[in-house]
Amino acid sequence: MIVANFVNGAPAATQETSPLVDPATGEEFGRAAVSRAAEVDAAVRAAASAFPAWSRTTPGDRQLALLKLADLLEAHAPEVADAEVRETGKVRAVLLDEEIPQCVDQIRFFAGAARALGAAAAGEYLPGHTSYQRREAVGVIAQITPWNYPLMMAVWKIAPALAAGNTVVLKPADTTPSSTVLLARLAAEVLPAGVFNVVLGDRDTGRLLVEHPVPAMVSLTGSTRAGVEVARAAAATVKRTHLELGGNAPVLVFDDVDVPAAVEGIVGAAFYNAGQDCTAASRVLVHSAVHDEFIAALVKAASAQVPGTDFGPLNSQAQLDRVLGLLSRSPATVHCGGKRHGSAGFFLEPTVISGLSQDDELVQEEAFAPLITVQSFADDDEAVALANGVPQGLASSIWTSDVSRAAALTARLDFGIVWVNTHGAVASEMPHGGFGASGYGKDLSLHGLEDYTRVKHVMIAH
């Protein structure tokens, strides 16, 4: 089995390939294309050729095409789920019941949003001159997606970009390409050739795509390190950048919560997708009055999670080694887990640790694993200081029965998303994006669509 590029409406082979490994077994099951300069250039040229006609289509025509794509994805959900399970080890039922339906809804949202972009009213803002604004497509968009949600992150990127009239060259992570290629094949049934292209490969492939002179914008979901590299490379040709980077979300638990209910919600949000989620509820801050009770309940609930049943493996041996390295260097108290699970695949035991100081590596870095750190706080001010005391600023949550406290703290938390008494819920209509080392730009919502447009002022003298 070889997974090929998909360019200009058709599969495109490459001379070089890399192994595909099932993370649940650690065994190679196929190969994926590795694209170099010629393949990247071919994909970019295809997108550039398709752009003039696609950008001139009406929003209504783009809406119809995206609605058809959503229907196709819904109809082919089992096939797409099988491809993603093989490369990620995800729980298949979760993909079919939660993730793919969300992807379908997100495509349908942007199909409608394509017809709902607003602007200031046309009028005479200077005497004798009529002004109006145009929202236009940016051009060819280079997009790079991560391995934790291969299909969903592809949808988050292509749906607003295509709805706005852009064309796309997307590079998925080298370990998880298949569901993105399947999405492109489905899209080829309803989109003109060259509108949505997929090139596979490694970091060098991504670098070639970012540095190519034709794309007008680069959109990346990935680590902060990758975001810095992309921003630096894009600056050389003054490309726009859209960066959704690392998370490291704090979870503030106050002494007025229903402890069992809060633990249930937090464990679900921490271990979903094996904690490989930029919004995972991984950094729990607990009021000192309920600290011991909360940890006892948390450890019991975490220990009941079964790797391979409740959540899947980590993405790769390299990711497992990285997390085990973080744990081996930590001075923390390990309450449960902390070790590899089994001998096959890349599973980590569900892990809860405490006794960490704010400057410890496992507090400052995103583990991206089924791992929860617990710290104690004495009052609201200390809770906010601990929560904000990391470089990342993507997501956070507050768990309290005090509505006034929740309202006050949402303003003080320096994160792009603040949930109250829940964590991880996503709505297509609401923006997703962070501050600080978590990047800039928004996915989902009308803000996400606007990010893939440019604004032109037209003034007519009369």
Image (cartoon, rainbow, N blue to C red):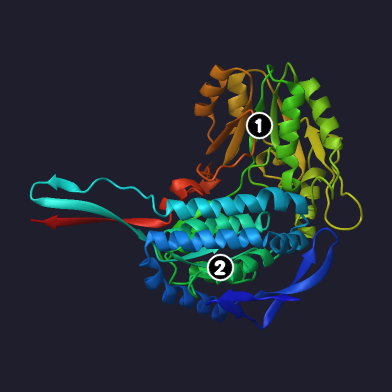
Q: Is residue 247 above or below residue 60?
A: above
| Mark 2 neighbour density, 10 Å: few (under 14) some (14–19) many (20 or more) | many
What kind of residue is marked 2? Ala
Please provide percent x and percent y for residue 228. Answer: 54, 55
Q: Is residue 223 visible?
A: no
Q: Which quadrant is home to the C terminus?
A: bottom left
User: Which residue is farthest bottom?
Assistant: 15
Q: On the rendered structure, is 417 left or right of 53?
A: right
Image disc number at residue 187: 2
Q: On the rendered structure, is 118 left or right of 367?
A: left
Earlier sequence position, callout 2 versus callout 1: 2
Which of 270 and 159 lies nearest the eye of the viewer?
159
- When asked about the image quadrant of residue 459, the answer is bottom left
| Badge 1 element | strand
* Residue at 71% in and 49% down: 97
| Badge 2 element | helix
Please provide percent x and percent y for residue 286. Answer: 70, 24
Give the number of the mark in front: 2 or 1: 2
Q: Is residue 408 above or below residue 369?
A: above
* Residue at 64% in and 71% down: 201
Which of 312 and 106 lies nearest the eye of the viewer?
106
Please provide percent x and percent y for residue 60. Answer: 40, 59
* Residue at 48% in and 70% down: 195
Give the residue at mark 1: 251
Which of 239 and 432 lies nearest the eye of the viewer?
432
Q: Is residue 32 visible?
A: yes
* Cα–Cα gap, marks 2 and 1: 39 Å
What kind of residue is marked 1? Val
Q: On the rendered structure, is 132 left or right of 101?
A: left
